[in-house]
Image (cartoon, helix red, strand yellow):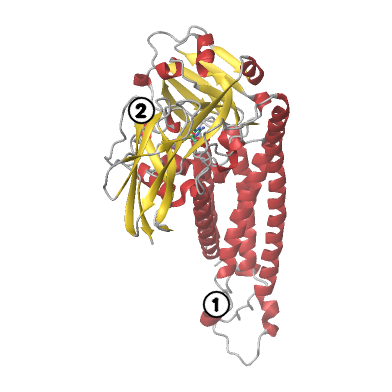
Amino acid sequence: MTDPASDPAPDRAPDRAPDRAPDPATDAETARPWWPPALAGVVALGLGLAVAEVVAGALGRAETPVVAVGEVFIDHTPGWLKDFAIQTFGTHDKTALLVGMGVVLVVLGALIGLLTARSKGLGLLAATVVLVVAGLAVNARPDTTMADLIPTLAGGLVALPTLSWLVGKAAPPAPAGPVLPARPAPTRRSFLTVAGITAGLAVVGAGLGQVLGARRAGVETSRDDLAASLDLPQATPPRGVDLSVSGEDPWRTPNQHFYRIDTALSEPLVRAEDWTLRVHGMVETEVELDYGELVAMGLENRWLTLNCVSNEVGGHLIGNALWTGVPIADVLALAKPRADADAVRSRSQDGWTAGTPLDVLTDGRDALLAVGMNGDPLPLAHGFPVRMIVPGLYGYVSATKWVVELEVTRFDDFEAYWTTRGWAEKGPVKVASRIDVPKGHAHVDAGTVAVAGVAWAQHRGIQGVEVRVDDGDWNAARLAAVPSADTWRQWVWEWDAQPGDHRLQVRATTADGEVQTSEQAPPVPDGASGWHTIDVTVG
Ligand SMILES: Nc1nc2c(c(=O)[nH]1)N[C@H]1C(S)=C(S)[C@@H](COP(=O)(O)O)O[C@H]1N2
Ligand SMILES: [Mo]
């Protein structure tokens, strides 16, 4: 394969059993297991990626090759695949993507290792192509500069020589001709080398954890300081909102149980001290606020229910919390939107955008730039330090997390993140209801059975919920109290359950008289509809 002079194999010839006739063909196969070069490729790639992570951590950059490729993948995922991922993995869709990327990386590393063993030139070329693709992915992310390429380059600078060296150890060049005996399999030495490298990798990985941890810790500290200084309220639910039917979700969703949906593979890490909000576009005066200035405008506390347009009928991509924040209308008023504007394009620190009707933000409803959630500063995953929350609109058109920019504009002049991917430009919440108790396909005892759940039509409110059994008459459920029209509302109906298989259905009516439609629609393009229906067995 390469220069035979570099092969020290002849020295080893005496090790060989003297009675065995040299057979280079079979020796080449038995003496060289396929896996050492493959493992070498995986280790080299892994080391390169680890180095990139560490360098990114040290530089305070979020765009590592893995994150960038993952995020580019997310941004280019067709709608149907995103829906499939959310349906299949729910809020674990990111874990699924990372596991999938891990598998692809292992296979890629192995293939590059094997290729390098066959031809060093081709192998290194393939590795370089991977590096360039990673660099292009980083470059494709919004707001990246040349400096964001440093982690990827550093990873490549380590991975390429490691690949060449490790594969050389794992698969030494073949003997030059049939007269030379094949050298014995270098399994022990290469194994030790690989093991050593892997151990080194583990150390690097631990270092990586430390560095990234430190950066995250800076943001966590910023958050802890605010927990002490912001004077957030106790998030005690008002009286009468919880019917406390066993098996039902609590009316107030604890932060750690609040669903999470976003396109960020690594949470944007923004310290409150570094945060600013720019309000610009079709305004009389551009405004820029820092965190202290925002909070000084006056904090309000509002119970608001947030849900995702991707939620299926009966789904759980919905939560209710006490949000603390400043009315968006107050901030917009500082900038004075021009009369011909009709939209606000909000932008997150990682470049995600939402388009919200300007009239919705200024019609007096409790649309907030929120800093607190259930009495705590916003959790990192829910948009620390500041996010938007607008009662009555799905999250994808209104609930921008890690928000840093409000651009007053016109719907005719832009498209927001999900609008370019087949979702509706406007996303008012559809009236919906869900049966939580009993569970679908449950077996329950005959007699009185509490059928219970929630209904929502944020900003319009729920005035009635009805349940029916086996296409029979509709029965009015008892409704819990609510502090405003902006939250979901619990309901319960006592069912005199007779033995047999039964079908339960629920529908809600809004305070302004709209009865929830039976017409089934999928989440795309503007939210699911239809009655939640479950089958239970009584006996
Ligand atoms: N920066 C950013 N904000 C975002 C998103 C996102 O991908 N990036 N997703 C939106 C969507 S689709 C929803 S449903 C809500 C979810 O908010 P949560 O994760 O706090 O529940 O956030 C919205 N805000
Ligand atoms: Mo969403």
Mark 2: is the Cβ under 8 angstroms from ligand 1? no
Q: Position of residue 457 (x, y in %)?
A: 40, 31
Categorize mark 1 by other alpha carbons within 10 Å: few (<14), some (14-19), many (20+).
some
The residue located at (69%, 60%) in the rendering is: 197
The residue located at (66%, 26%) in the rendering is: 232
Mark 1: is the Cβ under 8 angstroms from ligand 1? no
Are discs 2 and 1 less than 8 Å apart at CB? no
287 relative to 445 in the view: left or right: right
Q: Where the C terminus falls, by quadrant?
A: bottom left
Does residue 29 show up?
yes
Q: Position of residue 318 (x, y in %)?
A: 47, 38
Does residue 129 show up?
no
Considering depth in this image, is 537 or 41 the residue closer to the camera? 537
Q: Where the N terminus falls, by quadrant?
A: bottom right
Q: Position of residue 504 (x, y in %)?
A: 34, 49
Q: Position of residue 141 (x, y in %)?
A: 51, 35
Which amino acid type is shown beneath numbered disc 2? Glu
**C-alpha separation, residue under disc 2 versus residue under disc 1:** 63 Å
The residue that mark 2 highlights is: 425
The residue located at (57%, 86%) in the rendering is: 22
Residue 502 sits in quarter? bottom left
Categorize mark 2 by other alpha carbons within 10 Å: few (<14), some (14-19), many (20+).
many
Considering depth in this image, is 400 or 66 the residue closer to the camera? 400
Name above or below for residue 346 compared with residue 341.
below
The residue that mark 1 highlights is: 28
Which amino acid type is shown beneath numbered disc 1? Ala
